[in-house]
Image (cartoon, rainbow, N blue to C red):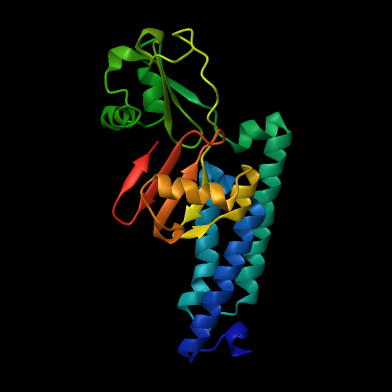
Amino acid sequence: MEVWHGAEDLPIYGFIIRATIIYIYIFMVVKILGQRSMVSFHPIDFIFAVIIGDVVGEPLSSGDIALGGPLAAASFIAGLHLTLSYLALKNARVRRIVEAEPIIIINKGHILVDELRKAKITVESLMMDLRLNQASDLTEIDYAILEPNGQISVIKKSKYDSLTPSDLMKDPPEKGYPSVLILEGKVNNSNLNKLGHTNEWLQEQVERHGFESIKEIFLLTVDERSERIFVSGETKKKIV
């Protein structure tokens, strides 16, 4: 019980058990809250992460602190965060309060200095973000928007957009996403059956790319139309 209630002379194995409990607890909280908190890092998500880290981190550094209080506080904060996220999803007014609005910092090719200062973005930082968006030439930019998650999205002027098949009056078939059929020498039978192929067909593809056995394949992927196949072994790779 000293692992849960804490003790001044908590042994090393006690800290290990505490770390395991807290890790499992944080893992469950993240699964309950969903992927939004990890992928789209809004200011409210940042606040949640800082507070949770501070609350559950203290019992790991101080063995005399009981686990019950910090975990209860963390659960309450997680519930509050989940409630605010749900209300923001359902109600536009709450969403405007909880989440920041996008800020246009370049409009029709002109930098909006006041908005740039309001967002506390320096010119150097802006140029860096534009380079990361493959938009280093300011003359090509139509709009640049600071999104609620802190990233800058760029919309180029139409004449600088890359040509698409639609621009060329082409209508190519959809490729879909590639499915992994072999990984580290093991067949993914679920994906193989989903694409309607057999192990015999897979073996033919392996031999067609110069391999003798499936075990020699590190990665083999196939698109939804089974027309584009990527094969990579220990020493060679090929795309057809």
Q: Is residue 237 above or below residue 58?
A: above
Look at 54% across and 46% down and name the residue there. 201
Q: State the residue in front, 97 or 32.
A: 32
Q: Position of residue 5 (x, y in %)?
A: 62, 84
Residue at the image point whose x is 60% and y is 80% from the top: 66
Image quadrant occupied by the C terminus: top left
Q: Is residue 104 visible?
A: yes
Residue 63 visible (yes or no):
no
* 108 relative to 154, above or below: above
Q: Which percent across, then down, holds residue 54?
A: 50, 64
**x, y (%) of residue 200?**
55, 51
The answer to whether 96 appears left or right of 146 in the picture is right
Residue 235 occupies which quadrant of the picture?
Answer: bottom left
Q: Is residue 13 above or below residue 116?
A: below
Q: Along the horizontal axis of the image, is 114 left or right of 177?
A: left
Left or right: residue 204 compared with residue 35:
left
- The residue lying at 69 percent from left, 30 percent from top is 93
Camera-nearest residue between 35 and 145:
35
Q: Depth check: 82 or 172 in front?
A: 172
Q: Quadrant of residue 159?
A: top left
Q: Which quadrant is the N terminus positioned in?
A: bottom right
